Amino acid sequence: MSKLRSNPGPVPDRWMYCPRKASELIVQKFMAFKTPLSANFDSQVPPECRFPPKMLFDLCKSKKVKFGLWIDLTNTTRFYDKEEVEAEGCKYIKLQCRGHGECPSKDQTSVFIELVNDFIIRNPLEAIAVHCTHGFNRTGFLIVSYLVTKYDCSLEQALTMFAKARPPGIYKGDYIEELYSRYDDVDDVPPAPYRPDWESDDSTSELNGSNDHLSNMASTSSGKSNNKRQNNVPQFMEGVPGVSAFTEQPKAFQLQNKVRLMCGWKSKGFPGCQPVTMDMQNITLLQQKPYMVSWKADGMRYLMLIDGPDEVYFFDRDNNVFKVQGLRFPYRKDLRHHLKDTLLDGEMVIDKVNGADIPRFLAYDIIRFSGQEVGKTHFRPTRLQCLENEIINPRIAAMEAGLINKATEPFSVRKKHFWEVTQAENLLGEKFAASLSHEPDGLIFQPAKDPYVAGRCDSVLKWKPVELNSVDFRMKIVKEGGEGRITQKVIHLYVGQLDVPFSKMRYKKELKDLDSKIIECKSENNQWVFMRERTDKSFPNSYNTAKSVCASISNPVTKEYLLNYIAVHRYHDDSEIMPPPSKRIKR
């Protein structure tokens, strides 16, 4: 003890301006924070940067958070005396993890998970404090591992939740890769976040401690902070009222799991059907079985869960949950009762009507209706008729009966129309485009007799004109030059499973606020051109998807080739031909 008081050693590298703690409890249970330093370090630490163990307890008492378990992951005992923790009535556990270039081992991870799980069972009302040196990589690795293992959430969602509370989340690429190796597909590893502003010291050494670099948090940081970063709260489509992020746990996990089971999805993450880009190979599917076609709206994709009164939820492609207020779905046989156990697939669009923006959800498929697995039936006619008869028509009847006030609803709900594949030419015509109140950007080809398929579906095809084919990148603004060359800013474009830039793009001043964001780009004159920010996605396209899109750009299925192929080679199913699209679709 006297040795500790007389010579505590140096302050850990990059500790001084590292944020003290997370902005909130993760799943209302875990507090992630950097290691506290005892008063023995006060001669080295200015008053505004000090962080003794008691400070964490004091900061959290005001929020009525009671810590029952304190887990120290550092590889040293010099930072503070465990008695300072135990004096607060909290159990102290030392779980040494080397940290310097090493992820927590599988054995260490198992010990952490079982330790935490046993504590939660015995002490359900108490919180758990977990720290390493900086409170990001080792701490995040173990908390994320627990969430994936015990909460049955996707790895992507667990990483996002940790990053939301302790932005920007786990920083080290090898830690993220190891998590994907253990709990997901290593081919889907996203790029690691970039270092925050406070981490200006590039040193990788630390005496008797470990090296966790990462992240920034404004509200609870000591000293400097990076206020430019957003708080990672999931954002719904801009311009749509009555929808907000739903993060209440464990209910959000339960909703995600319910939707996953409804879709028959055995993996993690978003379970919705994912079409593939049409190319010269898979276009032959149009010859092998009957297809239907619809326009591809330039909107945002969501699954909608209808689970009773005031229990309507959206799920975006990051599998974030959003709650909808003020929207009703009456039961056809009794308009005063509300549907439940129902899951729709669709896209949100913003229609322009008489100069006003009108948000509308276009439902184009149904997976479950009142607990029935309609997703296993044919798309035509069963699922399309179910959408019309059980979802859309009862709402119209309820409006006519005065049970729904359309004017008070946050947005409208429509059924998206599909036609026999020969109508593709009409859908690409100017008259049809003029009949829409939003921008189309291609076609969707849906197998008429196939069941709903969760995840990537190689038989659902999306076609875009070559000039609209696009890739979703994570962009990073960097400076290139030096050593006699003029230094200039350029944009590096990253995709999943690739830790070097996939391509580059010219820097423009209007893109300066999109650093590290997901952006959609198209190719013009062999150069990538910015189209829009993808606020509905946290990860870029995979390397394989990007390569596939590039192939479709270099060897495209042109409009002329597509229409000729349909005219000459399409599967003939004359008994089920539907009428062509009208000149004006009922909106």
Image (cartoon, rainbow, N blue to C red):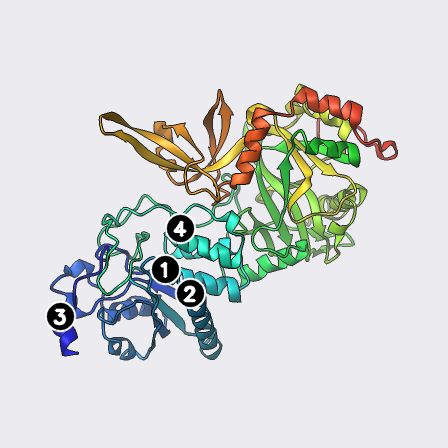
Front label number (3 vs 1)? 1
Report the Cα–Cα distance between label 3 and label 4.
35 Å
Which of marks 2 and 3 precedes in the sequence? 3
Q: Name the residue under label 4.
A: 173
Q: Mark 2 points at which residue?
A: 105
Report the Cα–Cα distance between label 3 and label 1.
28 Å
Nearer to us in this view, 265 or 352: 265
Front label number (2 vs 4)? 2
Asked if labels 4 and 2 touch by Cβ distance under 8 angstroms, the answer is no
Please tell me how crowded label 1 is: few (under 14), some (14-19), or many (20+) other residues with Cα within 10 Å: few
At x 76%, y 47%, the residue is: 386
Q: Position of residue 542 (x, y in %)?
A: 52, 42
Reply above or below: 565 against 304: above
Asked if labels 2 and 1 touch by Cβ distance under 8 angstroms, the answer is yes
Task: Inspect the image, locate mark 2, and give the three-letter code of the amino acid beneath it.
Answer: Ser
Q: Is residue 75 left or right of residue 258?
A: left
Work out which quarter of the rendered image holds the C terminus and state it.
top right
